[in-house]
Image: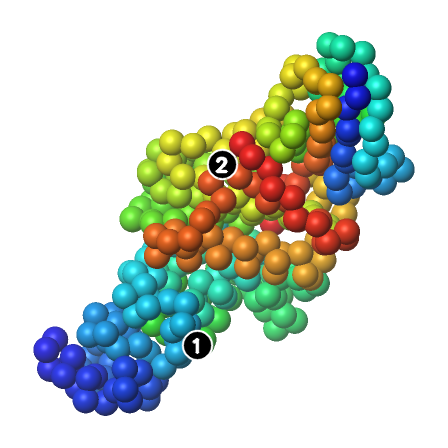
Amino acid sequence: MKEVRDFLCKQAEGDLLPWRHQAFAATHFGLSIGQVERLALEAGLLPSRYQRNRNMLTVAQQLRIFCGHVAVIGCGGLGGYVIEQLARLGVGRITAVDPDVFEEHNLNRQLYSSLAMLGQPKVEAARKRVAEINPAVTVIAHKCAYSKTNSGDILQDVDVVVDALDNIAVRLDLADTSAELNAPLVHGAIGGWYGQVSTQFPGENTLRKIYSRAVNAKGVESGLGNPSFTPAVIASLEVAEVCKILIGQGKTLNNRKIHINLFDMEMIELQY
Amino acid sequence: MKVTVKLFATFRIGRFGEMTKEYQPGTTVGDVLNELNLPPDEIGATLINHRHVEEDQQLQDGDTLSIFPLVGGG
C-alpha cells in the first residue's frame, strides 16, 4: 500500500487528487475506487471532487464520512434525494432498502424515477445512479420491505439509520430496532406542503413520542399527496443531520423536532 | 383563564391560525381538541409552550397550546 500512497502523493496537485489519477491508480494497482479514496484521505489528500467541501470539512472529517455506513430505509420521495446527497457528500457505504418498482405516479417527485425507469426496482436505480456520480461509494441494495424480521441483516454494521419510509407503524419498528442496535436514527416525514425532521439517539424514545397517538394512522399525506419540492427539503435536512453525526460536530435535532410548513414558510421547533 | 391556541398546517383550514380565549380552570388539552372537532387519529403533536404534552394535561392561565396534524409520508 506504501507504493500506492507514494504514487498518489506524487500525482497530487497540492493536496488535491484529481479524478484521472484516482481512476488510474485503481486500475494500475488492482484496487477499487473506494480503496484508493480511503488511501488518499488517510494520506491527507482530498479527491478533487470534494474541493468545494474543504472550507467546511477537513480531510480528516472527509475520511470519517468515507468510513461511514448509512442505511436509507425507503427509496421513494425522501430516499432518492437522501441517497443522492449522501453519495455526493462521500459516504463510503450506503445500504438502500425498498421493495418497489417505479410507477407513473412517482414521476412528480422521486429523483430516480424517469420514463425509462418505469417498472424498474427503486434500489437498482439508486445503485446505478450512485455508480455514475461517485464510484467510490458502495451501495448495498436490498429489494425488500424493511421489517422486524430482516432488520438484523439490513442494519448490520450501520453507523446511522435514515428513516425515509412512508408508513408510521414500520417507522416505529425501525426506531425501536435502531435503538436496540445502538444506531442513531434520523427521522423525516412529509405530507403536502408540510414535513418534519428529528434525530433519535440510542436511549431516547423520540419517535414513540412523536407518534404516540397514532401508531396505525395515516398522516396529512393521505389527503394531500406529495409535490416535487417537499421531499427535497426534508431529505436535505436529514442529510445535514447525518453529516453532523458522522463527523461528531454541530448541534443535532435530538429531543427536538422541526416542523416545516412550506405553505406559510414557517419552521417551528418542538421539544420532546 | 386565558389560553392561546395555535393551529398548524391543515388544521388551519376552515378554523384559524391563532386565537386567545377564556377557558374554565381544569380544561385539558383533550377538551380543546374535542371543542375544535379535531379527530384523535389526525393529531400529530400537542405542545404547551413548545413542550410535548399528552391529552390529559391541564391548561394553565397564559399557556400557549400548539396543535399539529400527523405527517407520515415519505
Q: x and y percent of residue A64 in the render?
A: 30, 61
Residue A157 appearing in the image: yes
Q: Quadrant of the C terminus of chain A?
A: top right
**Residue type of the residue flagged with mark 2:** Asn
Residue A167 appearing in the image: no
Q: Which is more toward the observer, A114 or A109?
A: A109
Q: Which is more toward the observer, B39 or A64?
A: A64
**Is disc 2 surrounded by few (<14), some (14 to 19) or many (20+) residues within 10 Å?**
some
User: As drawn, is B24 to the left or to the right of A177?
Assistant: right
**Mark 2–mark 1 distance (CA, rounded to whole Å):** 32 Å
> Circle 1 marks a residue in which chain?
A
Residue A3 found in image quarter: bottom left
> Circle 2 marks a residue in which chain?
A
**Residue type of the residue flagged with mark 1:** Arg
Check if mark 2's residue and mark 1's residue have beta carbons within 8 Å.
no
Q: Residue at x 79, y 21 (%)?
A: B2
Q: x and y percent of residue A223 in the render?
A: 77, 43
| Disc marking residue A96 | none
Q: Which is more toward the observer, A229 or A204?
A: A204
Count all numbered tags in the image, as a single digit. 2
| Disc marking residue A52 | 1
Q: Secondary structure at mark 1?
A: helix
User: As drawn, is A111 to the left or to the right of A92?
Assistant: right
**Is disc 1 surrounded by few (<14), some (14 to 19) or many (20+) residues within 10 Å?**
few
Query: Height in image: B23 above or below A17?
Result: above
Q: x and y percent of residue A236 in the render?
A: 55, 59
Closer to the chain start, of discs 2 and 1, is: 1
Q: Secondary structure at mark 2?
A: loop
Q: Which residue is mark 2?
A: A255
Q: Quadrant of the N terminus of chain A?
A: bottom left
Residue A28 found in image quarter: bottom left
Q: How is the image coloured?
A: rainbow
